[in-house]
Image (tube, helix red, strand yellow):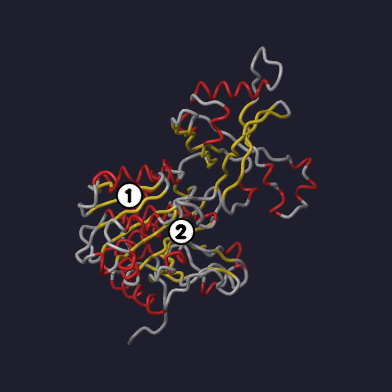
């Protein structure tokens, strides 16, 4: 008799455990090395070159395997298909940026016989989660002569922290709302305390400046032309007695970016053109020239398309998976979830028909026809998948880059794994859901 009820599957019941462990080991190593969008693009380029992909700006568009970087913070990857691009393409897009804390342009100061860096947080963080943990600086400084200095204090052995108020004096602090406990202006990074001898004023600050000059060849003014981010120190790691989880900074959204990158590198010759587009600035609304709203996407496609009219026609024949994470059901906070429509750990790739908030506002809402086609593909290819919404109606909400591609006329749906502790310094993802993401993106790019 035909089964009429809908039942989700568990990744560990379907996939080969050895294959799950293989990709998880590689991902853990990758995430331990890569903690910013620049670092991801640099690592991706290295891997793509190893797989025979050519840089469009250096070698043209004659190869079947192509990629192009933009300002070192976004990358687009092409794998030409059996059909021409005029018949459309299959695109997986994801974002490379994650919530973090950035330095201000004039960060260094001395107060109370201590030296600090002033900061400005990036994206939707719970500020109280980022104090008293080990942090490192990653990024670039452009010096006055135009020279670029790459900064990775983790590799150099320098670690930092943001102090918090002791509980003995914190009675009033603990009576505040959670979002007010740590004011943004109090996210000041402790960087030193040794005074420079023979100096009369700002002895500690001047000692730090001397050290920065010795270490990186920079002076205080160079901070003005820098991009320096504070990210959690330490490696990604397995979690649980059964080692079924991965704890890491930046699962949102580098788990999707990694899975998409691995997916397109695992394909030989897809039916339609396969495209992976990894962008920046999603966590702050996708504004800026390296974001999903940038014209870089169109400008790159004009390498293959003769005019704008032809490009619009191609868009209407193209399909997109917007790779982004969803919230995993957390039984410690049941009150914010609607269990029948929540996403669960270990139940595979989450198909999210719509996002937004307050009545699907600012959402891409995928058509029933497109959802049906994705369902059919995943079922035929034995991809473990589920469907899920981001919490109860009117509980909150969120958005992705999906709507920016839908505006062009493409069919788009959000599709990524569920994670616990989203936007925390360390997030939790399932090894099996990582594999399901890789599997789903691969078959979509290859066969849809």
Q: In x, y percent, where is residue 445?
A: 30, 63
- Determine the residue positioned at 53% across, 65% down: 329
In this rendering, position of residue 83 left or right of residue 101:
left
Q: Which residue is disc 1 drawn over?
A: 68
Could you tell me which secondary element the residue under label 1 belongs to?
Answer: strand
Q: How far is disc 2 from disc 1 in space, using C-alphas?
A: 17 Å
Instruction: State the image quarter where residue 370 is shown.
Output: bottom left
175 w.r.t. 83: above or below = above
Q: Toward the viewer: 194 or 283?
A: 283
- Determine the residue positioned at 60% across, 46% down: 121
In the picture, the disc for residue 293 is 2
Could you tell me which secondary element the residue under label 2 belongs to?
Answer: loop
Q: In x, y percent, where is residue 61?
A: 24, 52
- Determine the residue positioned at 38% across, 79% down: 369
336 w.r.t. 233: above or below = below
Query: Crowding near pointer 1: few (<14 within 10 Å), some, many (20+)?
Result: many
Instruction: State the image quarter where residue 195 is shown.
Output: top right
Q: Give whichever of discs 2 and 1 has the lower sequence position.
A: 1
Q: Toward the viewer: 72 or 11?
A: 72
What is the total number of numbered labels drawn onto the structure image?
2
């Amino acid at each position: 008799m035909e089964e009429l009820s809908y039942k989700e599957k568990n990744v560990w019941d379907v996939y080969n455990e050895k294959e799950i462990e293989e990709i998880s080991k590689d991902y853990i190593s990758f995430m331990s090395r890569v903690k910013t969008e620049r670092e991801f693009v640099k690592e991706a380029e290295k891997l793509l070159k190893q797989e025979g992909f050519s840089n469009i700006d250096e070698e043209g568009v004659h190869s079947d395997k192509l990629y192009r970087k933009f300002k070192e913070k976004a990358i687009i990857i092409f794998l030409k298909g059996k059909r021409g691009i005029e018949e459309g393409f299959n695109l997986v897009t994801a974002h490379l940026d994650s919530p973090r804390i950035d330095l201000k342009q004039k960060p260094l100061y001395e107060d109370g016989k201590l030296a600090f860096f002033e900061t400005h947080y990036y994206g939707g963080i719970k500020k109280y989660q980022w104090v008293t943990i080990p942090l490192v600086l990653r990024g670039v400084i452009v010096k006055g002569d135009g020279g670029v200095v790459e900064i990775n204090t983790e590799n150099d052995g320098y670690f930092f922290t943001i102090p918090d108020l002791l509980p003995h004096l914190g009675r009033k602090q603990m009576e505040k709302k959670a979002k007010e406990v740590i004011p943004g202006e109090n996210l000041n990074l402790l960087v030193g305390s040794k005074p420079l001898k023979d100096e009369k004023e700002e002895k500690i600050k001047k000692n730090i400046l001397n050290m920065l000059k010795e270490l990186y060849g920079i002076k205080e003014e160079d901070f003005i032309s820098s991009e320096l981010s504070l990210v959690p120190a330490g490696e990604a790691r397995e979690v649980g007695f059964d080692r079924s989880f991965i704890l890491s900074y930046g699962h949102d959204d580098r788990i999707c970016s990694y899975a998409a990158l691995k997916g397109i590198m695992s394909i030989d010759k897809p039916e339609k053109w396969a495209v992976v587009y990894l962008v920046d600035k999603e966590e702050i609304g996708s504004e800026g020239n390296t974001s999903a709203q940038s014209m870089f996407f169109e400008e790159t496609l004009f390498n293959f398309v003769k005019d704008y009219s032809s490009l619009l026609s191609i868009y209407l024949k193209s399909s997109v998976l917007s790779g982004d994470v969803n919230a995993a059901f957390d039984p410690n906070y049941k009150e914010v979830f609607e269990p029948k429509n929540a996403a669960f750990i270990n139940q595979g790739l989450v198909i999210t028909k719509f996002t937004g908030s307050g009545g699907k506002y600012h959402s891409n809402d995928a058509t029933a026809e497109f959802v049906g086609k994705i369902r059919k593909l995943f079922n035929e290819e034995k991809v473990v998948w589920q469907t899920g919404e981001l919490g109860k109606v009117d509980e909150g909400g969120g958005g992705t880059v999906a709507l920016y591609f839908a505006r062009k006329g493409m069919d788009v749906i959000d599709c990524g794994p569920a994670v616990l502790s989203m936007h925390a310094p360390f997030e939790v993802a399932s090894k099996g859901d990582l594999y399901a993401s890789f599997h789903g993106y691969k078959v979509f790019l290859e066969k849809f």
